[in-house]
Image: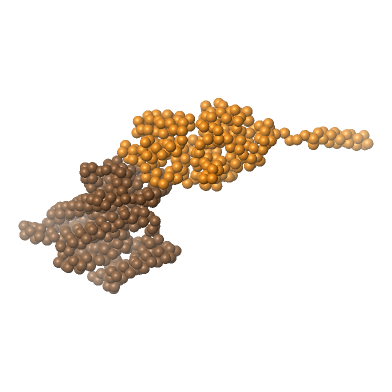
Chain colours: A brown, B orange
Amino acid sequence: MVFVKKAWLTNPWVIIASIFLGLVIGFNDPLLAKKLSALGRLYLSLMGMCILPIMITAILSSFGKLLRASYIADMLKRLTGFLVMGLLVTAIFGVLAALITKPGLMINAQAKQLLSEKIIDTQMTAAGCSDCQNFMDFLTGMVPTNIFHALSQGNNLAVLFFSILLGVALGLVPLASAEKTLENLHVFYLALLKMVDWIMCGLPIGLCFLFTGYATQIKWSELTALANLVILIYASGLLLLIVCSLVIWRNSKLTYFKSIAVLKTPLLIGFGTCSSFAAIPTMIQSLEKNLHIERNLVELIIPLGVNLFRPASILRLAIVSIFVAQLYGQHLTLIQLAMVVVTSVLAGIAASGVPGIASVSVLAYVLQPLGLPTALGTVLLITITPIIDPILTLLNVYSTCTLGVLMKKKGKIQNYNERAS
Amino acid sequence: MRKNAKVLLYLLNFFFMGLWPSYGYAISYPADIEQILNRKKLIVGIFSKDNPPFIMHDKAGHLSGYDIELAKYLAEKLGVGIVFNQEAKTYDEMIDLVNQKKVDIAMSLITPTLERAQKVRFTRPYLYLHQALLYNRLTAAKDKITDPANQPEKLAGLKMGLLKSSTYVQYSKQNFPNADYVYYENMADVMNDVKQGKLFAAFSYQIALAHWLDEQVDAGLYTGISKLNDRVEPIAIAVSWEHPNLLAWFDLALRLIDLENKDAHLKNYYFAKYIL
C-alpha cells in the first residue's frame, strides 16, 4: 500500500513551509485569509468524512480477530493499566508544574481585566450556565439510544461503545461466514484508507489554508495578557512530548531521531488540524508500517486511545484548576491537590463525550469540589484554547502512539500464551 | 319674497353675531399645565445620588442618563425648559416633594407602589426592570449556590446589602426572607462590599448592577449577576394628585413615545447592552 504517492507532500519541511505561508497570509491579509480558511475547513471536512467509518471498521475487524487470540484478557488489562497510569501521571505533572511556576499569582492587572470582561460577556449571552452535566449524564451519553442517531451526530463515545460490543459479538459468532464478514469489513477499511491517501495529497495546501484562519483568530492582546499560562502549557506539553518520544525510542529498535521521524505524518496532521481524529488513519498506518506493531492491535488501540486516552485535556484541566485557585488566593491542602489529580482524570475522560468547545464545561467537576467558581476557569479555557490547541492535539496524538507502542511489548506474553495453549 | 330675504339676512347676522365673541377670547389651558407654560420650565425631581445608567454625572459634572434624557425630551415636547431638583435624599422624600408640589413631576426610577399612590398619582410605566442579585462568586461556590436569585432558601444567614428606603427593602423581605439585611446610603458601596466579600449579595435593578460591573476593571472575576425569574418592576413618573391634566399629558406622551419607539436610541445608548 502506497501511503502517499508523492513523498514530498508529507515532507515535514514542505508542511512547515505551508503552515508558515498560511500564517503569513493570515497576518497580512485578513480578508483573503477569511476566504482561504473556508477552503481550509472544507479540507478538514474532507479529512473528517472518512474518520468515523474508519474507526468503526477498524474496531470491528480488529476486535473480532483479537477475540480469537488468547491474550486478549492480558492485553485489555495492560491497556487499562497504561491508560490509567498515563492519565494519572499527566494530572500529577500538571498540578506540580502549576504549583511550581505559580501562573495564577503572577497574573497582571491587564489579564484580570481581560478575563473579567470575558466573564461578563459570556454571562450576557448565556445567562445562568449552571446546568453542568454530571457523571451519570456522561454514562447515558455513552450508551446510544439509537446507533444511527449517534452516528449522524458524531457521538464518538457512543459509536465506540456500540462498535466494541458488535466487534465482540462478531468475534463470537461460531460461523465460518463470520470470519468472512470480518474480512469484508477489513476490505472496507482498506478502501477508506485509500481515500484518505488521496486526500492526504492536499495536505500542504489544506494546512496552509487552515492556518490562514488560525492566524486571524489569534488575538495578540489576549495572548500577551495570558502569556505565562500559555507558555506554561506549551512547556509542559513539550516536556510530556519528550517523555513520549523517549518511551517510543526505548521500545523501538530505531535511533532516537528516526523514532520521531517515522511518526511525523500523524504528528503534523494533529498539530495542523487540531483534531486527533483526523490523524487516526495515518497513526494506524505509521505504527503498523514503520514501527511494526501488529495490525489488529493498532486498529483497536488507536481508535480507543484517541477517544479515551487524552492526557492533553487532563494536563489543561489540572493546570487551569490550580491557576484558578491561585488567582482567588485559595491555598490548597494536600488532600485537595490529590482531589484535583483524580477529578481532572475523571473530567478529562468525561470530556471525550462532549463535543467541541462545550467540553470545557467538565472543568466544573474539578473546581466544584474545591469550592471554587467555575466561570473564570471556563472563560480562561475558551480564551486560550485556540492558542494551545495545536500543542495539546499533538500531545494527544503522540501519547496515543506511545500507548500503541507500549502495547506492542506484549510479544512476550503472546509467546507465553501460545506456548501455554 | 322681500320678507324672506329679510329673515335670511337676520339669520345670517345672528350667526355672525353669535360667532363674534369667540374672536375676542384666548384658548384656555388647564390650570396645572398653564402654570408650567407660564413658568416656561418643568421642574423635575430626581434622586440626590447617581443611579447609573439612569441618572449620573459625567466627568464635567453634567447630568446624563436615560431618565435625564427622557425628561428633557418630554419638556421639549411640552415646549418648556427643564430644571432638576436634587433635594430628595430618599425615594420617600421625592414622593413628598411631588405631593407638596415643590416639583411638577418626579422621574428617577420610581416604582409605583400602592402606598405611594395614596400621596401622588403615577403615569403608565415607561420602563420595566428586572430585579437581580450581584453576588460574590467565591461565597457562592463555597456554599454551592448556582443561581442565588432563585434559591432564596440557600441565602439563609447570608448578608445582603440594600439601599435605604428603596422599594428593595420590601422586595427583599418578600423574596429573601431569611437573608441578613444590611442597609446602605449608597449603592456603589454595597456593590464594592460584595466584591470584597463583606456581603454575599446586593439586591437591585439588574441594569444598574450590570452597569456597575461593566465600569469596574476586574469585578467580573469576583462577582456575578443572577436575575430573578418572572419578576419585573414597573417604573413610572409621579405627578401631584392635584394635577390630573398634567398626568394625562404625560400619560399620552409616554404612550406615543412607546408606540413610535422614540426612545430606542436612548435605550441603546444607555442600557440595552446590560439587559440579560
> What count of labels does the image hold?
0
Foreground pick, A329 / A166? A329
Residue A78 image point, x, y percent: 15, 54
- Residue at image coords 55%, 30%: B95
Residue at the extreme left of the image, as rendered: A420
Query: Residue B242, relative to residue A165: is it above or below?
Result: above
* Residue A208: quarter of image: bottom left
Image coordinates for residue B181, horizontal then vertical, percent = 40, 30
Residue sitting at 25 percent across and 71 percent down?
A2
Query: A18 above or below B93?
Result: below
Nearer the observer, A263 or B95: B95
In the image, what residue occupies the spot 41% across and 46% down?
B217
**Image quadrant assignment for residue A201:** bottom left
Residue sitting at x 38%, y 64%: A212
Q: Quadrant of the N terminus of chain A?
A: bottom left
A417 is higher (above) or lower (below) than A125: below
Is residue A97 found left or right of B80 in the rendered image? left
Q: Is residue A317 shown to the viewer in this render?
A: no
Is A92 or B101 nearer to us in this picture?
B101
- Image quarter (top left, top right, bottom left or bottom right) of the C terminus of chain A: bottom left
Q: Residue furthest right?
A: B2
Q: Quadrant of residue B245?
A: top right
Q: Position of residue A332 (x, y in %)?
A: 25, 43
Relative to B117, is A218 on the left or the right?
A: left
Q: Is residue A370 shown above or below A262? A: above
Left or right: B251 as drawn, with respect to B141: right
Residue A225 visible from this viewpoint: yes
